[in-house]
Amino acid sequence: MKKVFIKLIKLLGYELIDQNRFVSPTLKKELNEDLSIINQKSIVLPLGEVKITKKIKSVLIIFRTNTDVDIWDQNKKRLFEKPKIEYSLRALNSLIKSITFSKTKYPNIKFKTIIVDDKSKEENLNKLKKLINGSGLDISINLLNHEKYKDKIKQQKNNQTFSNLASLLQSFELGKEHGKDLVFFVEDDYLHFEPMMEEMIASYERIASQVNKDIFMCPADYPYLYMSNEKTNILIGNKRHWRTINQTLCTFMTTKSLIDKYWDNFYNNCLDRNEPFEKYLNEIYTKEFCISPLKSLSLHLTNVNSSYGLSPFINFKKLWEENEY
């Protein structure tokens, strides 16, 4: 009778919880395991189930690299004060780890990574290629075409700023051209925790399905978000809390449909050095949901005193050492 009852409950689309034995007979899992099923349902105890309507089949990652410039438009040193190539390699290594981890959880989701590289020396480019070749992932390198953007981007005070704007515009264009579902724009000075990609995808599906609209997601919990007394909403993701925000830097995830919808904002953000730099991107967040995790899934490795850098309550040195390549 018990087996028949369990089968009937599953046919009706429900799940059973046995709190005495701390298991779910219908899911055949202990309650401390991941109870969600990607592209079907998100289950968080004790909040129950969310039916997934915003399903993900592919993730396009656009990874921007500049392996020579320490911090553009600044003379400051980054945390640990290493050559820039060291940050690029560790950032890419952590991203590869996170994608690989996510692929084991979600084998039916297609991952593709395009690297937009800004004039790396051959020695540095070969180091990136060696890391890519050993990853077993779909990763290609797209060299930044400076000439293409000389007549589009306004003349800047220095070549670094122009290159940064051109790199960003080329990344956005690639996302618009090749993206299908989720598109993740990420810079080469972020270290990622291994579950980052899994949590971003699963939390996107849950939260976007709940609010019934596509959303923006930032993987980092920036310190500057706590420097003004702004109201925020707290949401439940896959395995952590998320908060609504109205600002990001240039590392964020969204959907192809939102890129198309706000293409003028994406494009205009790259035509000149704005104040703040992400001015036109931030305008979008007055109309659309944008969220960041509590606590952080990624670490922005800037100067230790930067309000746009190190996320609170993270073991910075441990994450840095884990991603040595």
Image (cartoon, rainbow, N blue to C red):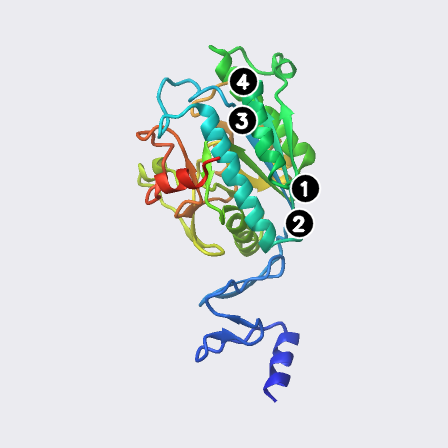
Horizontal and vertical percent for residue 61? 59, 37
Specify which label sits upstream in the sequence, 3 or 1.
3
Specify which label sits upstream in the sequence, 1 or 4.
4
Q: Which numbered disc, 4 or 3, marks the residue closer to the eye?
A: 3
Q: Residue at x 39, y 26 (%)?
A: 82
Amino acid type, residue under disc 1 in the picture? Lys
Amino acid type, residue under disc 3 in the picture? Thr
Q: In 3D space, how far apart are the residues under numbered discs 4 and 3 (Cα atoms)?
A: 11 Å
Specify which label sits upstream in the sequence, 4 or 3.
3
Q: Which numbered disc, 3 or 1, marks the residue closer to the eye?
A: 3
Horizontal and vertical percent for residue 170? 61, 25
Q: Residue at x 54, y 18 (%)?
A: 163
Question: Are circles 2 and 1 on residues that touch, CB within 8 Å?
Answer: yes
**SS assignment at label 2:** loop
Amino acid type, residue under disc 2 in the picture? Lys
Task: Identify residue for label 2.
Answer: 57
Q: Residue at x 46, y 19 (%)?
A: 69
Residue 186 in sight:
yes
Specify which label sits upstream in the sequence, 2 or 3.
2
Horizontal and vertical percent for residue 75? 36, 17
Q: Residue at x 46, y 66 (%)?
A: 32
Question: Are circles 3 and 1 on residues that touch, CB within 8 Å?
Answer: no
Task: Identify residue for label 3.
Answer: 65
- Find residue 200 and name its label: none
Which quarter shows the N terminus? bottom right
**SS assignment at label 3:** strand
Specify which label sits upstream in the sequence, 4 or 2.
2
Task: Identify residue for label 4.
Answer: 163
Q: In 3D space, how far apart are the residues under numbered discs 2 and 1 (Cα atoms)?
A: 8 Å
Q: Few, some or many C-alpha atoms within 10 Å of disc 1 (few <14, some 14-19, many ≥20)? A: some
Q: In 3D space, how far apart are the residues under numbered discs 2 and 3 (Cα atoms)?
A: 26 Å
